Image (tube, grey):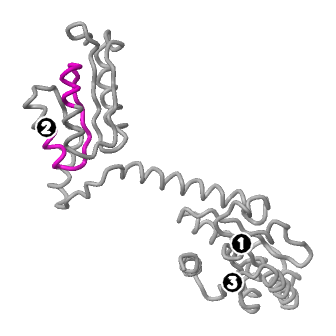
Amino acid sequence: MGALNGKKSQFFIVSDSVGETGELVAKAAISQFRPGMQDVAVRRFPHIENREQINEILQFAIEQQAMVVYTLVKEEMRDFTKTLCARKNIPNIDLMGPTMEMFTTALQVEPIEEPGLVRKLDDDYFKKIEAIEFAVKYDDGRDPRGLLKADIVLIGVSRTSKTPLSQFLAHKRLKVANVPLVPEVEPPEELFHVPKEKCFGLVISPEKLNNIRKERLIALGLNDSASYAKVERIDEEINHFYRIVDRIGCPVIDVTNKAVEETANDILRRIKE
């Protein structure tokens, strides 16, 4: 594979998205024809939306003696390209059509035919990973700088499901930081600069919290009569919690008998509203 009639051989990649798939396949194929690979150019024509654009590209392909590789998700656009290439005697290959037709037959479902969905899915995936890493980095008040970067800030006393709730919301691509509130430690100053609509206080009934903390102490091999689980200590912490909430002006969600999913949906609903 090399020059044709003194001209450098070319692949034209025609796509209704960015053309990355077509270029990768073309380059993979070219790599199997050494020597001469250096004489082949690959040129992308992305975001093609109508027949006029295809017509212009194919006319240019004739002038450049280029081969055409196309990844078009709309059947009508694929058919038009295939017909025109045949009429103009342009070497061409449809990378998307045969696979989509096979899936349509096997699954008995018509394709959406919306360009760029793979890139959207990739973007969603990386946003989710970024949000999960954020939740880990700024968990349990570890770094107060994260509070002003977060989409959501959770505050509450110990054992109010702040960490699992942060992770659940991270899977919804939301960056969540959480801060434990204890009377002996003043909350970070950054907390009071968070917009109140982004902050949510989590509270639980003293009786429920008493049971949870006792079970936690036993699981750790400790005496369940420790101060951490005493009702007096819990009341002190909850009173402190409400003092901080009043300063911020944020909403409070009672998580006493709620699963993490329920609390998350409550928060998502409030944000949407």
> Considering only order in the chain, which callout, 2 or 1, is on the residue closer to the N terminus?
2
What residue lies at 26% left-to-right and 58% top-to-bottom? Answer: 112
Q: Say which element carries label 3.
A: loop
What residue lies at 56% left-to-right and 54% top-to-bottom? Answer: 129
Q: Say which element carries label 2.
A: helix
Circle 1: residue type: Pro
Does residue 98 lie above or below 168 as drawn?
above
What residue lies at 24% left-to-right and 39% top-to-bottom? Answer: 53
Judged left or right of residue 3, residue 207 is right
Does residue 94 lie above or below 89 as drawn?
below
For residue 251, which numbered disc appears in the image?
3
In this picture, which residue range is highlighted in magenta?
58-81
- Closer to the camera: disc 2 or disc 3? 2
> Considering only order in the chain, which callout, 3 or 2, is on the residue closer to the N terminus?
2
Circle 3: residue type: Pro
For residue 195, which numbered disc appears in the image?
1
Q: Check contact, mark 1 vs mark 3: CB within 8 A.
A: no
Separation (CA) of disc 1 from disc 3: 12 Å
Occupied quadrant, residue 132: bottom right
For residue 60, which numbered disc appears in the image?
none
For residue 82, which numbered disc appears in the image?
2
Q: Say which element carries label 1.
A: loop
Residue 170 horizontal/vertical position (percent): 58, 63
Q: Is residue 71 magenta?
A: yes
